[in-house]
Amino acid sequence: MIVAQSVEDLEKIDEAIETSTVSGWEIGAALVIAVLAWPVSSVLGRLARRLSRRIPGTPDYVPELVGRSTRAIVVLVAAAWSMSLLGVDVGWFALVVVLVAVVVFLMIRPLIENLAAGLLLQSRPSFGVGDEVATNGYVGDVIAINARSTVIKTRDWKRIHIPNQDVLDNPIDVYTAFERRRSTLDIKVDYAADPAEASQVLVDATTAVEGVKDDPPAVVLARGFGAGSTILQVRWWHDPDIRSQNGTLDGVVRAIREALDSAGIDMPSPELRLAGEAAIEVRKSGELP
């Protein structure tokens, strides 16, 4: 039984290897390919490793991975080529290569996507290092754009790495795209106040704040009515960064409060007004408050 099985295995091997049609030239070519496979794979591996290191922001492990993968592929291709010259059926090799390629692709797919996104961001940038942006729920200064991620330093000095693919797939607010930016603030003034007079008070107070630009000048627009009030919107321009926005907003709020108090213009509080009206109605009905 064992002898019969061994004979059957040898027959299968003989069927897979057609040595009757192999010439001396093919044997010599197979030997040359086998001998040159290792040095050629080493040269190509070093070249691939060197080229991958030239990509800005490439992680340290990527060039080594690329070099080893290149060497392995060259050796496998050379081995299959040599065996095919010797009459070996290498149809299985194509299947193995496809399976390995699929597995490797699935493993490094996120890296490839982020690398491609990083190259796109660097070649056709909508923003760059030094810009102040808001994306993926984070706000801060861009300090680096590498092969895998966009690095942001937040206002509270945190370093955030956002994958480049996420940066491309989501909206990006670039605060420093232009030389200035506009902010707004809604103010409710008493309905009895003259809107023109109140608007002039608001413009004068806003213009006097440090950081508010004269060109374009600050303006006030009437936006509607509230509970016993007129809604006025103050618009002013400042430097594009968030620090300037927050700084001028703080100054504008303080200046407007002081200016309206000095001009005798009230800013009604809905809660106080409702409480007062309720007390008046109670007194009119003759009941105790």
Image (cartoon, rainbow, N blue to C red):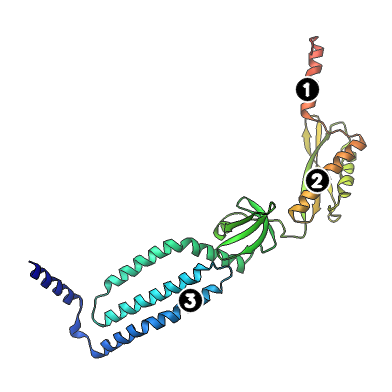
- 3D distance between C-alphas at marks 1 and 2: 30 Å
Q: Depth-wise, is mark 2 or mark 3 nearer the camera?
A: 3
Residue 220 is at least partly visible in this image = no
Amino acid type of the residue tagged 3 in the rendering: Ala
Give the x, y percent position of residue 136: 60, 52
- The N terminus lies in which quarter of the figure? bottom left
The quarter holding residue 181 reads bottom right
Amino acid type of the residue tagged 2 in the rendering: Asp
Give the x, y percent position of residue 87: 23, 80
Asked if the residue under mark 2 is in contact with the one under mark 1, i.e. CB atoms within 8 Å, the reply is no
Neighbor class of circle 1 (other Cα within 10 Å; few <14, some 14-19, many 20+) is few
Determine the residue positioned at 37% across, 85% down: 36
Q: Relative to 274, is 255 above or below?
A: below
Reading the image, the residue beneath label 3 is 48
Amino acid type of the residue tagged 1 in the rendering: Ala
Determine the residue positioned at 81% across, 50% down: 236
> Does label 1 or label 2 sit earlier along the sequence?
2
Reading the image, the residue beneath label 1 is 275
Reading the image, the residue beneath label 2 is 250
- 3D distance between C-alphas at marks 1 and 3: 77 Å
Determine the residue positioned at 62% across, 50% down: 137
- The C terminus lies in which quarter of the figure? top right
